[in-house]
Amino acid sequence: MYSNQRETKPRSSFKRKVLNLAYETGLIRAGRSLWASSLTVVNYHRIDDPDRSDFDSFKPNVSATAQEFDRQLDYLAKWFHVVSLKDIVEWLDGHKELPPHAALITFDDGYLDNYTSAFPLLRKYNFPALIFLTTGHIGADAPFYWDMAAYCFAHTRSDQVTFPDGQVKHWANQAERDRVSKNWIESMKTLPQVEKQSYVESLPALLGVSIPAGYFQQLMMNWDQVREMQKGGIEFGAHTVHHPILTRITSEQVREEIIGSKSRIEAEVGVPVLGFAYPNGQASDLNEEIEKIVGESGIRAAFTLRNGPSPQSEVKRNPYAIRRIFISYRHSLAEYAMMLSPINRYRSN
């Protein structure tokens, strides 16, 4: 899970018009030839419709509707050469070259809609993809805290909630409630892991919500679906067991989270796990010690959520901090094209 207020904020009408014009005229790809030797890694989480009436999980985790995802894959097919993690590892080992404008499609967490919505479209374009699994949630009725919190806010009859700093936030309509919900979920990232767990566990009672047993069972993929996708050309990487921000836990816990996730996936699919994605993925969420632990586990490439794309020389210099481009359902196709351009690299996260 990662959300950024500024990245998902709608652009002004004027800015959208300018961006659409740049997209339609091809200006958005100006200077693209200078970045032929680059790696563009696109990051998705969920393929769903956050505006459907019964959607009651964390909206900012939705990357695109199925229709928009189809359009984005079509754009990749026209302007990029989509590669697999295996291709990247073979390139890192000096056994092959990457094609010009190489792109890697990735997903985080392991939501069911990766199987039901994304997988058929990836097959339509014959594209490989890499899905990073948070293994403690695969095939389990164990929601991520952000989805559990979003459910509680969606179903509460209350009109207020207390934040960890003691502030009480009120809402008078759904839009205000959604904003408070997102801010409450974001506030959890600032807390130590144990304190965060305590606040999250108390939220249903705080909002007067009862969660039906088994309600979240169908939110994530199960291991049979993972194996089916693996046989269909989808690769799987590790994304920890429980999705902690790794700089907030001990080194021993970091090892347990990384190795535990990697080992479980290897046991389920029968092939080595070569990729890892850092939870939250910002500069403050990893460091040299964590990168070293990732490398010692046998992982060959690890991915952040700092804006990309990346020069190939940068990736070779440090394959344990590869940039990725976070995609939101709020992004139009023109915005998507802009984010995949070199311009995006110089935007602050």
Image (cartoon, grey):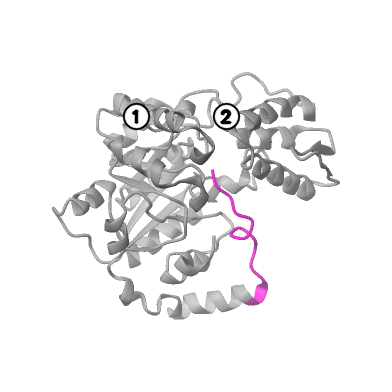
Indicate yes or no whether the magenta region holds residue 6: yes
Q: Which amino acid does label 1 sit on?
A: Ile
Kindly identify the residue that appears in the image at 32 percent across and 61 percent down.
Answer: 314
Kindly identify the residue that appears in the image at 56 percent across and 54 percent down.
Answer: 329
Nearer the observer, 131 or 224: 131
Q: Counting other residues with Cα less than 10 Å from the Cα at mark 2, is it few (<14), some (14-19), or many (20 or more)?
A: some
Q: Relative to residue 185, is residue 20 drawn left or right?
A: left
Kindly identify the residue that appears in the image at 59 percent across and 58 percent down.
Answer: 330
Q: Counting other residues with Cα less than 10 Å from the Cα at mark 1, is it few (<14), some (14-19), or many (20 or more)?
A: many
Q: Would you identify the image quadrant in which residue 295 lies?
A: top left
Is residue 253 visible in the rendered image? The answer is yes
Where does the magenta region start and end?
A: 1-14
Quarter holding the N terminus is top right
Tags 2 and 1 in contact by the CB under 8 Å rule? no
As drawn, the residue found furthest toward the left would be 95
Q: In this view, does 141 lie above or below 9?
A: above
Sequence order check: which comes first, mark 2 or mark 1? 2
Give the labeled residue for mark 1: 265
Q: What residue type is labelled 2?
A: Pro
Indicate yes or no whether the magenta region holds residue 101: no
Residue 345 placement (x, y as % from top left): 45, 66
Q: Is residue 339 above or below residue 85?
A: below
Nearer the observer, 177 or 65: 177
Give the labeled residue for mark 2: 143
* Residue 316 tag number: none
Q: Relative to residue 142, is residue 212 drawn left or right?
A: right
Residue 119 placement (x, y as % from top left): 39, 43
Q: Relative to residue 39, is residue 8 drawn left or right?
A: right
Q: Is residue 117 above or below residue 332?
A: above
Secondary structure beneath dot 2 equals loop
Residue 102 placement (x, y as % from top left): 29, 61
Residue 76 placement (x, y as % from top left): 37, 61
